[in-house]
Image (cartoon, rainbow, N blue to C red):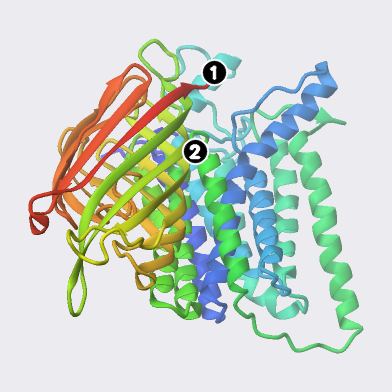
Amino acid sequence: MTLANPLGAYPELFGPFYVAALLGAYLTAAVMGYRRGWPPASWLLVLAAAGLGGIVGTRVLPIALDAVRALIDGGIAPEASVKRIPGAIAGALLGAEVARRALGIRQSVLEPLAYSGLVALVLVRVGCLLAGCCFGTPTDGVLGATYASGSFVHGFHVAEGVVGAGAAGPHAVHPVPLYDIVFALGLLALLPAVSRRLRIAGNLCWATVGAYAVHRFAQDFVRAREVEAIAGLTSIQVAMAITAVLALGWVLLSERRARQRPALASSPLAEAPVARLVGLLVALLAARVALDGWLTAPESVSLFVRLLPAAGAVAVVLWRHAAAPHLRWTATALAAGLPLVMGFQILTPEADSTGADGGTERFTMFAVEAHGGTGVYQEQEVCDSNLNQYRTAGVGIAHVTVDIDRAFTRELGLGLSGGTQENADPGSTREGEPGVNTYDAHAYVRLEGKNFGGHFGARVGEITYLGADENDVANIAQTFGFRAGPRRFHLQGGFFDGSLMGSPAPAVHFGLGTGGLTAAGQEVRFQGGLSGSGVYASGTFVLDQFLIEPIVAFAGTVSDQPYHVGARVRYSIPID
């Protein structure tokens, strides 16, 4: 029985191994930080920043290097679509350092990244071997490896004239990914011994970076598809030479100075202040949203896996520091819920999809809206009950991104609303007595995919929980909504979610719905179910760029009066 040659025969396996490399690096670093007793929220945020930086760096470095070469050759700076491991290393270290400083951490946190980076290198290079995307120059030496017939290497050798068009397979080449695997495994075995000899925190990481730079500099002499840039060296070799000198020079110099001074005891890593944790989490979430459409599906999965535990850890810190119960629940839901809602994106096909005509079916628009409502509710108290009537109105604006091919929409919005209340008990001496006015600002993000959707946000102001006195007022409240199932038929529900179900309208609702996504990117829905009022129904009607959405809710406890009647009018403005 003859086994098929696996080298370059499975290009579809690069994606899974790329994901495994990203997740393997994350888990390695997370476990090492946990075993060192580092505070979870701070450390997981640093790892999320490192992951984001690595993904950006692997794209940006090729653009920068190709731009330098193109400027030297012809005065132009084209984009580059390839990915580079040195760029991932630089981006990850930069992201980790920026996060460390943003959190006010003085100690270096880079040492676990030395181990995690080598783990990622091993896994991703296994994928490269099987996919055949990275390979070396032809060789007849003992180290030569022959890739499979029909692989990318085979096609490249035929195109370059290395082998004839009728050749059964490519010429033997230097197995560059295998060199990386051997290097990474060998260095992983040496790191514990090297760590014991170093006195400066973080130098293990810089020593690893320097060693990789030397390895990559030498490797490029036998790496295929590399173009000379300066003095017979490739652009990567120039960058690696500079990196090796700086990294190894810093390690040698700092260690020499450290040995001339008495050793200082390192203080334990403390949890960062709450404000810094929340600020960094918000910045990372904003960066993730801004990169939507640029990330591949594996990269989106990796960032989601990093952001969700980090947000959960921040939620735990907020829970411990918040005094009032409603602030605890709000802080926890805001910190942990938003990345979960963002996770709906990874359940749809990856970004950058194109239509049947080859054009990208992706566009953006602004949406402005106005809404109003009125209703009567019954406030149950210890000794009696009161009827209260309210009137609300508000305006809002949103930025909407639509991908028709993926049936995906993303909406970032801000709304302002206010309302009045008064006693409505007929014949009562309190009839007409004013209650607490309500006003709030509402910021939210809404994500809708093929089979799942939802939104998350927060209301800040004077928010009434269907009450007419000061005891029923909150200053901050989370808003949440979900859709489970395809638009055509789904379960739906929410809490304080949007202009129609917001304060002081029926706060909680759950039911069924149907609808669809129009070619103009408008979400059309007809829904009904149970709410705080009893039962409710809502619908959506589209008139060109206008969307009109009425809602009505009934409560049998109020003499079958309409509990809530309201409407929203939205106008969409396409962005060229």
> Compared with residue 265, is residue 403 higher up or lower down, i.e. above or below?
above
Is residue 31 visible to the viewer in this orientation of the structure?
A: yes
Q: Quadrant of residue 543?
A: top left
**Which element carries disc 2, helix, strand or loop?**
loop
> Compared with residue 474, is residue 147 higher up or lower down, i.e. above or below?
above
The residue located at (62%, 33%) in the rendering is: 139
* Badge number at residue 576: 1
Q: Assign the N terminus to one quadrant of the image.
A: top left
Is residue 350 visible to the viewer in this orientation of the structure?
A: no
The residue located at (41%, 48%) in the rendering is: 342
Query: Is residue 526 toward the left or the right of residue 101 in the image?
Result: left
Earlier residue among tags 1 and 2: 2
Q: CA distance from mark 1 to mark 2?
A: 19 Å
Q: Observer-nearest residue: 489 or 162?
A: 489
Expressed as whole percent of the image width and height from the top left, the position of residue 112 reads: 60, 68
**Which element carries disc 1, helix, strand or loop?**
loop
Q: Observer-nearest residue: 1 or 88?
A: 88
Expressed as whole percent of the image width and height from the top left, the position of residue 302 reads: 46, 51
Label 1 neighbour load within 10 Å: few <14, some 14-19, many 20+ = few
Q: Assign the C terminus to one quadrant of the image.
A: top right
The residue located at (85%, 54%) in the rendering is: 245
The residue indicated by pointer 2 is 292
Amino acid type at circle 1 is Asp
Q: Observer-nearest residue: 109 or 163?
A: 109
Expressed as whole percent of the image width and height from the top left, the position of residue 496 reads: 32, 54
Query: Is residue 217 toward the left or the right of residue 37 in the image?
Result: right
